[in-house]
Image (cartoon, grey):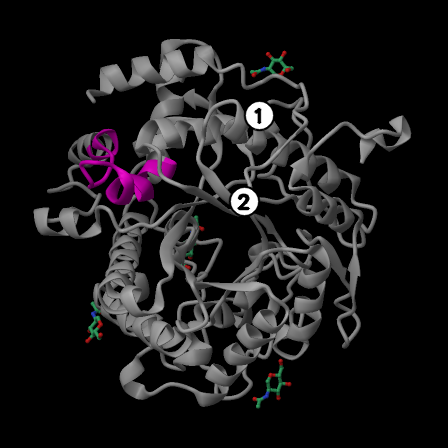
Amino acid sequence: MTSALRILVFSILVALCSCQSDEFLYDTFPAGFKWGAATSAYQIEGAWNISGKGESIWDTFVHSDEPHVADGSTGDVACDSYNFFREDVALLKNLGVNFYRFSFSWSRLIPTGDLRDGFSEPGVDYYNGVINELLANNIEPTVTLYHWDLPQGLQDVGGWLNRTVVERFAEYADLAFLLFGDRVKTWYTVNEPWVQAVQGHGWGDYAPGLNQSGILDYQAGHHLLLSHARGWRIYDEKYRNSQGGKIGYTMDSSWLEPKTQTQADIDAAERGMQFKLGWFAHPVYSVDGDYPPIMKEYVARHSAEEGFPQSRLSEFTPEEVAYVRGTFDYFGLNHYTTNLAEYAVYPFAPSYATDAEVFPSFNETWPESSADWLRVVPWGFRKLLNWVKNEYGDIPIFITENGYADFPGTIDDVGRVDYYRSYINEMLKAIKLDGCNVIGYTAWSVIDNFEWAAGYTQRFGLHYVDFSDPARPRTPKSSAALYKQIIADNGFPAPPKNEDKNDL
Ligand SMILES: *[C@@H]1O[C@H](CO)[C@@H](O)[C@H](O)[C@H]1NC(C)=O
Ligand SMILES: *[C@@H]1O[C@H](CO)[C@@H](O)[C@H](O)[C@H]1NC(C)=O
Ligand SMILES: *[C@@H]1O[C@H](CO)[C@@H](O)[C@H](O)[C@H]1NC(C)=O
Ligand SMILES: *[C@@H]1O[C@H](CO)[C@@H](O)[C@H](O)[C@H]1NC(C)=O
């Protein structure tokens, strides 16, 4: 599709979609729809220096003298799920989920990150314990291989900026399939490559804390994409026949709504979607592969204007385009919020924002959360699902994260109850009214946990965790009861009989 035609189709789609309708849809999800909840290793496990685990870039980042974390906290102990994982499984069992999405700490399994230095038996024992406990409770274990905690040993030789990381990731993935693939049948290679690239290498607010936007973020992103593809192909070629599982990766994306109906803002919103989700989706899910044409065009033009001898965006060879394209079994999507998109030319360069020529903002009427980046805009979820279907075709979409941030101590979390009810309902509309092929949904998160640079100041859990108590007691919030009910009903079969319960 030419970009003019693409923009035309997009404009028609936006015009036709009555997605901002507030009417609640009483209906159920298709039979076999999968419900789950998620965590990641660094955010919950603690035990950062136990049983031979090597340090990761997050260990380094939180222990550095620079103040990287809002409340000065660390994930050294976090929810202590290294010791309390049976409690976590009991919470999942009570929710009635079909699956649990959690991640392996690469450096707990391979302390230096390089398998040639050996792997850790206690690390393997720990994940065998988690997996077997889940299976004993009839919950499917689904595993993220990389959720941002690169072994420090690999960072010491350049981390995601050094192409050899792709080989190290391939060896790690292969080991994971070999050791755990008899029981793990759903894999996610890389979680949110955009965040690892942009926040870890462009802005520097996340580990490894590098901040050359428009340069290092593109280089890191390139190797994250190649690593995903390597992991997928190893599974496909070596393990799929014998193990019979599925593998994909999980991208994060907001929905971008044009700030005004001017052509400049409508184009900016579409371009912003290509720079955000398209950056990591187009190479894998589009028919042609490679980065989105408009992203290549804009970065190349800006690079030339700035006097760079070549585009700051890395290039795939034709062989790599073919190697990366089609490496999916599903479209893993993490979604939280919506932004307004406005056409903008920035005074500073080079940077990712300059390249996209998009300024993101919020409509001040959108309800806030405890995270400044997260506003409650349920209809954006439905528009995003329609965009994915329109852009990449009828690929099964797997919602691998969705959730809401509140403040520490909230147990009657009415904000999260409202968020889940309305977002899950918009997903239902996308399936039932728009024909989007969504196969599963994952709530982020099972428990309050270490929210990266926000530390423990923002809480995403369905369960409250008391981080001042060494036993880390977990207490269900109101949203846990709501989610349990949605799962039991497989949706929203009918309006509540008792009007008083309307707000549940
Ligand atoms: C692990 O780190 C903790 C601090 O989080 C420290 O008290 C303890 O001594 C360390 N243990 C080892 C074996 O280094
Ligand atoms: C990349 O990593 C390899 C080890 O895998 C190392 O020998 C090499 O020096 C690294 N390159 C850079 C530029 O750091
Ligand atoms: C970028 O990182 C360098 C090195 O850590 C630091 O000195 C500088 O203040 C950072 N710049 C910004 C804008 O964060
Ligand atoms: C913000 O939302 C309000 C209420 O829906 C709407 O009237 C207004 O036009 C919106 N403004 C923008 C810039 O989207």
The residue nearer to you, when weighing 129 against 189, is: 129
Amino acid under disc 2: Phe
Q: Residue 35 vs residue 278: left or right?
A: right
- As drawn, the label of residue 219 is none
Give the left or right position of residue 64, taking residue 285 as reference. Answer: right
Res. 379 mark: 1
Q: Which residue is drawn at the image coordinates 56% and 33% (left, top)?
A: 427
Q: Quick one: 347 or 383, which is closer to the camera?
A: 383
37 lies above or below 325: below
User: Which residues, given as a range, are shown in magenta?
Assistant: 276-296
Query: Ligand 4 sits in which quadrant?
Result: top right
Q: Secondary structure at mark 1?
A: helix
Please state if 127 lies on the left or on the right of 497 as rendered.
Answer: left
* The C terminus sits in image quarter: top right
Q: Residue 175 occupies which quadrant of the picture?
A: bottom left
Residue 33 circle label: 2
Quadrant containing the N terminus is top left
Residue neighbourhood size for the residue with mark 1, other residues' Cα within 10 Å, grouped as few (<14), some (14–19), many (≥20): many
Disc nearer the start of the sequence (2/1): 2
